[in-house]
């Protein structure tokens, strides 16, 4: 994909961003954990953390060495923690746990942005707009 884009427009390698929403947000997290040097910024909007466990393994710390990626986690405050489960507990608990696991790892910066009152679907355009303006 990158060569096709580079043939159409100039690419700033220091600003390349991978953005994804919902299951695409899981893809962003997978890409970060497995190839932290591929992009400068990783933006995971409303990642479907309820669908699968995201594990930050010891190998990630090794892959992260020498890299300085930025991760932006985003979520709407009206999103349930699990759309298929009961609405109990803190809806963004998994996101906060992931943020805690990643905070403080050398070379990785992590930010969190919430979209007040927005549902899962509403965060798609809002998060893309936010990423384009912020990054």
Image (spheres, grey):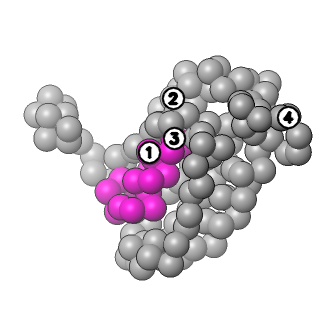
Q: Nearer the viewer, mark 4 or mark 3?
A: 4
Position of 121 relative to 48 (above/below): above
| Residue at 51%, 41% in the rendered image | 25
C-alpha separation, residue under disc 4 versus residue under disc 3: 22 Å
Q: Which residue is mark 1?
A: 27
Looking at the picture, how far across and down is residue 83, in whole percent?
Answer: 71, 30
Residue 128, numbered circle: 2
Q: Earlier in the sequence, mark 2 or mark 3?
A: 3
> 10 Å neighbourhood of mark 1: few (<14), some, or many (≥20)?
some
Q: Nearer the viewer, residue 50 or 90?
A: 50
Q: Position of residue 21 (x, y in %)?
A: 52, 33
> First in sequence: mark 1 or mark 2?
1
- Cα separation, mark 4 vs mark 2, equals 27 Å
Q: Is residue 45 magenta?
A: no
Q: CA distance from mark 2 to mark 3?
A: 12 Å
Residue occupying the point 36% across, 53% down: 39
Q: Is residue 59 left or right of residue 47?
A: left
Q: Which type of secondary structure does the marked residue at label 1 adopt? A: helix
Quick check: 86 above or below 124?
Answer: below
Q: Earlier in the sequence, mark 4 or mark 3?
A: 3
Q: Which residues are magenta?
A: 25-44
Quarter of the image where one finds residue 113: top right
Q: CA distance from mark 1 to mark 2?
A: 15 Å
Mark 4 vs mark 2, foreground winner is 4
Residue denoted by label 3: 25
Question: In the drawing, what numbered circle is on residue 87?
Answer: 4
């Amino acid at each position: 994909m990158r060569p096709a884009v580079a043939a159409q427009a100039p690419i700033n390698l220091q600003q390349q961003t991978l953005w994804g929403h919902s299951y695409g947000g899981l893809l962003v997290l997978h890409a970060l954990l497995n190839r932290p040097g591929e992009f400068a910024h990783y933006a995971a909007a409303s990642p479907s953390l309820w669908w699968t466990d995201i594990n930050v393994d010891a190998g990630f710390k090794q892959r992260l060495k020498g890299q300085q990626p930025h991760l932006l986690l985003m979520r709407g405050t009206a999103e349930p923690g699990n759309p298929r489960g009961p609405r109990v507990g803190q809806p963004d608990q998994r996101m906060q746990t992931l943020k805690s696991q990643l905070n403080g790892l050398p070379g990785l910066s992590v930010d969190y942005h919430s979209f007040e009152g927005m549902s899962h679907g509403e965060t798609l355009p809002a998060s893309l707009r936010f990423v384009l303006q912020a990054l």
